[in-house]
Amino acid sequence: MENFEVYEGSNDLPVVVSCEHASGFVPEELNNLGVSVDELNSCNYLFDKGAEGAYDFLVAKLGCNGIKAKVSRLVIDVNRDLDQESLIRTSCGPHSFNGNKGITEEEKKDRIEKYYLPYRNKLHNLLSDCEKKHGVCFYFSIHTMENCFEKERREMDFAIIYNKGEKVAKKLGESLEKKGHVVTYNNPYTLKKDIIRVTHDSEVMKFNEFAVVVEINDGLVNDLNITESLFDAIRSVAEDYSSQK
Ligand SMILES: [Zn+2]
């Protein structure tokens, strides 16, 4: 199976949206990674709760191109660099994934070629196509974060995480704050690496300047207000740019 599904929009806005942690699907031949179905389903790393719905809503309403993953990040995390340890996680809380722990170099290479590279390459193509058409491409990677973390409730509606894309992050955040949302920046975590990851095509690295990760509080993600506000904020970032051209 292919590890991505592309949404083809009318592309009137210079925007691409993605959802790396949309799916909790683990291919049958991987035997639930060596744990029971219940253990697998109880792992908060399996997928981002509610992220796929938010992504579906955004691409349809923005009419932009989008890409979402079809395989769980526990098989291989397309949102990591190839040299990061959490690329293929070996545990979740008390549960050890024996199917990932003992993975051979060959099996790892197989997962990279089957699930990782096709996703990253397709995303890079979408960004390049968008830039060719519009002269710029704003990229939003949509995630959800846990509402309750280590027994404390997270107070923010959105966390905007960025590295080189500070300008876009601030514009997006201002627009969300104007609607009364609580927004944090590079909190609860920061990026160690760029958002656009190098695979074979270093050309795409230039898109990092226009790239941000948006984490939606998963306790609020099904609230239409939240996704509507995010849609408005993304649209205003793109339209502001167009009007300044
Ligand atoms: Zn995520």
Image (spheres, rainbow, N blue to C red):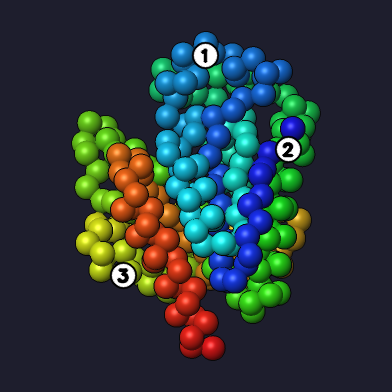
Residue 174 is tagged as 3
Question: On screen, 99 above or below 119?
Answer: above
Across and down, in percent, residue 202 comes to 71, 63
Give the class, few, some or many, for how many residues have Cα within 10 Å of label 2's Cα (few <14, many ≥20): few
Q: Residue at x 27, y 35 (%)?
A: 148
Element on which disc 3 rests = helix
Across and down, in percent, residue 114 comes to 75, 36
**Dot 1 amino acid type:** Val
Cβ of mark 3 under 8 Å from ligand 1: the answer is: no
Pointer 2 residue: 2
Q: Earlier in the sequence, mark 3 or mark 1?
A: 1
Q: Residue furthest top?
A: 36
Give the class, few, some or many, for how many residues have Cα within 10 Å of label 3's Cα (few <14, many ≥20): some
Across and down, in percent, residue 51 comes to 46, 43
**Dot 3 amino acid type:** Glu
Q: Earlier in the sequence, mark 3 or mark 2?
A: 2
Question: On screen, 80 above or below 33?
Answer: below
Cβ of mark 2 under 8 Å from ligand 1: the answer is: no
Q: Residue at x 64, y 77 (%)?
A: 134
Question: On screen, 116 above or below 92?
Answer: below
| Residue 115 appears in the figure | yes
Query: From mark 3 to mark 2, how far is it between C-alphas?
Result: 37 Å
Residue 37 is tagged as 1
Position of 98 with respect to 120 (left or right) is left
Which residue is at the front of the view, 31 or 133? 133
Quadrant the N terminus occupies? top right
Position of 230 with respect to 208 (left or right) is left
Q: Residue at x 38, y 53 (%)?
A: 227
Query: From mark 3 to mark 1, how far is it between C-alphas?
Result: 42 Å
